Image (cartoon, rainbow, N blue to C red):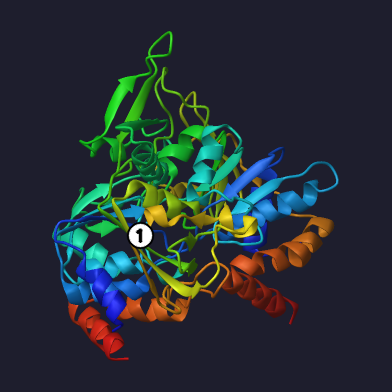
Amino acid sequence: MSGVLLRETLIFTIARLLEGVRMVAVGAASPIPAAGSMLRRALDESGHQVRLSVLGSVKHNFFTNGSAELFDAAGQGRLDAFFLGGGQIDGRANVNLVGVGGYPASTVRWPGSFGSAYLYFTVPKVILFREEHSPRVLVDQVDFVSAPGISPAGVYRPGGPVALLTSKALFHFDKDRPGFTLESVHPGHTAADIAEATGFAYECHGTPRQTLLPDAAELALLRGRVLDEIAETYPAFAADWRRDLATQAA
Amino acid sequence: MQADLRAMAASIEPGMRIALPVDYAGVSMAMTRPMIAHGAGNLDLVCVPTGGLQVDQLIGAGLVRSVETSAMSLGEAGGAPRFNQAVKDGSIRLRDSTCPAVHAGLMAAQKGSPFVPLRGLLGTDVLRHRDDWRVIDNPFADQGDPIVLIPAIRPDLAIFHAAMADRFGNVWIGRRRELGAMAYASTRTLVTVERIVDHDLLAEERTAAGTLPALYVTAIATAPRGAWPYGLWGEYPTDTDELMRYARAARTAEGFAGYMAQEAAA
């Protein structure tokens, strides 16, 4: 289908990655993961209930025990999926949310590790999502490990990364190798593009497929219900999306 | 500046360890300027579990010795400028943490226990840089099972803002239970509220469960819109434009000083 916006492809891809989850949580400043989770919930509505907790939302957040409850629920094994970004992500899926160039006096300081050093261990399906796909973000080795991609045997680790989604491509993560494999490229990108933009080594089998796009029904759900739902927590994001749709229609 | 806010700030002593809440839980921004005017420095701040505008302003005013936090940012307004500068200069001591570790440390203090064990963290640089955390083998496991111990966090003081208190000193915190956790763990707790009601919040079943009893509350002062420019749950939204105005101004020390002087005059 033509006319699918990049952000719609990303939201739809997240919804596909979330297939089968019962409970998903979304952290701060994550409109696309939140929208993907809302689409998953809408798609599954006739089959089973997807519970969704969006940090910063009043309507889409059912926790009543303060900000500790999300982590308690994850520790209990109740949380199936979560999202992590990162100023740097490396080829072993280590995530750096702290900074670049030394510690503690780093040359570039990012906000900090948030809950990553815990949730990466306890949530079975962690989706790495970072729109910027460049060698400065996808690096060979992170400068600071906020959360490691894998752990040695003997470390309690029911959780970890399953995929990495960027504005250019989708990778899946194999924890036994360990490493990423290029799964698909988004419309307009090629295997060569991706190689140039990626600072770590990954596997690529033949010519990568194009990332699956939503069909007409899924797109209608996205532009209707999901767009309305996301506007409560992320009004600026929703307004941008609406503007892009209007521009495209004109 | 209100006399009661000034009096509360005057009880802060140099070198105190102070717990402050996450931006959406009820930050007592109304206390920030009285704290700066009072001037007690060398503060060790504990962000529960992340910090933002208030922490950034206290750092900018030179009152902070160390920050224990899972993250520092101004949300949609971007990075915390005075914090970032202080990190670059090495002028504050950093204790990078992760959200559940802050909660675990407060929980240990709440129970009067020396520590709480916490999953995760193994193999991270967060753990590597924390000389106050320990790794032991789970004594209940048949074979090796390493787990991190988080020592109790016992702040001298907790400061937050809530919608209402009653005239008996009880504070309604609703579902923002981290405010309770901060108060249980801290020796003293200072609270600003939108309003003080006449009826006893504990007398009514509907409000009693969401109420922090006066046992844990040292002092209360009214401060309408006391979280501004942050929002307060159920009361008013965050003023993101104002956060952005601060973020722009506070990129430099001079800009920060100008912003703080202007707001104090307003």
- Residue B100: tell me if it is visible: yes
Local crowd size for mark 1, using a 10 Å CA cut-off: few (<14), some (14–19), many (≥20)? many
**Residue B173 x/y as whole percent:** 50, 59
Residue B112: x %, y % from top left: 33, 36
Residue A121 horizontal side relative to residue B95, left or right: right
At horizontal 49% and vertical 23% (from top left) the residue drawn is A176
Q: Residue furthest top?
A: B142
Residue B2 at x, y percent in the picture = 31, 82
| Element at label 1 | loop
Q: Who's the residue at 28% across and 67% down the image?
A: B56
The residue lying at 27 percent from left, 86 percent from top is B264
| Near-viewer residue (A100 or B67) | B67
Nearer the observer, B102 or B115: B115
**Figure check: A41 above or below A78:** below
For residue A48, above or below residue A231: above
- Using the image, name the chain to which the residue with label 1 belongs: B
| Rendering quarter of residue B58 | bottom left
Instruction: Count up the numbered dots.
Output: 1
Q: Which residue is drawn at 52% across and 27% down?
A: A158
**Residue B186, how many percent across, how many down?**
31, 50
Which residue position holds label 1? B51
Amino acid type indicated by mark 1: Gly
State whether residue A93 appears in this view. no
Relative to A29, is B21 on the left or the right? left
Left or right of B250 on screen, residue B179: right
Q: Quadrant of the C terminus of chain A?
A: bottom right
Residue A182 versus residue A165 in the image, above or below? above
A224 and B228: which one is in front?
B228
